[in-house]
Image (cartoon, rainbow, N blue to C red):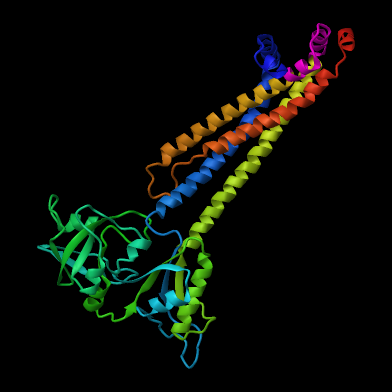
Amino acid sequence: MNSLKVLFDRDTWQEIFGSISKNKTRTVITVIGVLWGIFIYIALSGAAKGLDNGFERQFENIAMNSMFIWAQRTSIPYEGFKIGRRIDLKITDIEKLKQRVPEIQYIAPRNAKGVFGGAAPTVTRNNKSSNYNVYGDYPVYTKIATKKIYEKGRFINDEDIRLNRKVCVIGERTQKELFKKDEEPVGQYVRIDNIYFQVIGVHKYVPGGGFESDGDIFIPFTTFRKLYNTGNNVDWFTIAAFDDVDVVAVEKEIKQTLKKIHTVAPEDERAIGGFNLGEVFNKIVGFSKGMTLLSLIVGIATIIAGVIGIGNILLISVKERTKELGVRRALGATPSEVRNQIVLESVFLTTIAGIMGIVLGALVLFGINMFTQDMTDFPYTNPTVPIPFVLSALFIMVFLGTLIGLIPAQRAVSIKPIDALREE
């Protein structure tokens, strides 16, 4: 009850502001110390979150726990096979991998023409022609890497695969270069290496989907096999593991399984190549968490230093106000009233500094967001700090302000009225 009385007492606040106004420079410098601490926390945490959000945006169209596996040449002789033997992945490897590596959620075999330095097929429509990368795919690929298809079209389905249909999904650039501006491409035909294919959809290109571009053309895997006589060979597998597994361990297990299938030495690290997107993403997430932890440690350390500074100026203030406090005690002020006033002054200064630091940090993050929001080629967007984190930081500041305020408050209470009145 006493605390509430002090909190809403006009005279108490007049004394607090009077004390602050007597030492403006000292108070401002000390408040800046606390303000700087929470500003650092907000700015660094927001920056780390912006980086995290940026990479999530870059990889939003492909599974975070995915990887690419391809075959190369052996570097170690094994079981009668010489060094430098070329390994060919097969469509039959899929079932064996699924059986032996249960952590695999999806696996999509892929073939392509035009990528990795190969000559891109010629695609023609009427009197227009150009060269575009052509991929042979299964529908399962879209479960790993999302394909945004415009409303009137679709992606390859199981019937296309089963019937070896000559259908294709073209890119935005392909549509722009081979079709008239207002012409609907879906249902029309294009020639891929002099074979007619019906357009069933147009995919919207979104950066971050690997090495694909806005001119790529997708056809059924089985049709690609017949068109380019690839047989059961597969250029590479795009694989997604389940969310709760170690993607690095899964990649190793997949490679070891393929080595067994294709009679490759277990210690041969060059025969099976791979790129683990899940591992890269986990490193990014780890870096982001490290940045957040660093911002928390630095921010709290700076806040503590600032709060100690507030305690110091209050101790000095108590010493300077010894006579005033003695008069108050002589006129009937209780020890709890004096203590509450000093603590309230400490909490007030800490809270004001905290709010100013939060506002300044928010303004900086807003400015960074405005500057980076249109930079789609840079993995950074929407730097924010969750409201609960901000409120928690403010609560810690108020708590520390209360604790540090108890030291000068106890010093004020320990002053005897008679000794204070005698002091010149």
Name the spot of residue 284 as percent of width and height, x first. 51, 54
Q: Which residue corresponds to the image point at 21% horizontal and 76% vertical from the top-left?
A: 227
Location of residue 18 (image quadrant): top right
Residue 384 visible to an observer of this rendering: yes
Tell whether 361 sits left or right of 193. right
The answer to whether 348 appears left or right of 211 in the picture is right
- Placement of the C terminus among the 4 image quadrants: top right
Tell me how many marks there are. Answer: 0
Q: Is residue 113 above or below residue 319?
A: below
Q: Is residue 310 left or right of residue 98?
A: right
Residue 221 falls inside the magenta stretch: no
Residue 197 in the image, given as x and y percentages of width and height: 16, 68
> In this orientation, which residue lies closer to the viewer: 282 or 151?
151
Q: Which residues are magenta?
A: 321-341
Which residue sits furthest bottom? 80
| Image spot of residue 32 (x, y percent) | 63, 27
- Between 29 and 221, the one lying in front of the other is 221
Q: Answer yes or no: is residue 211 visible.
A: no
Above or below for 294 versus 162: above
Report the quarter where the N terminus lies. Answer: top right
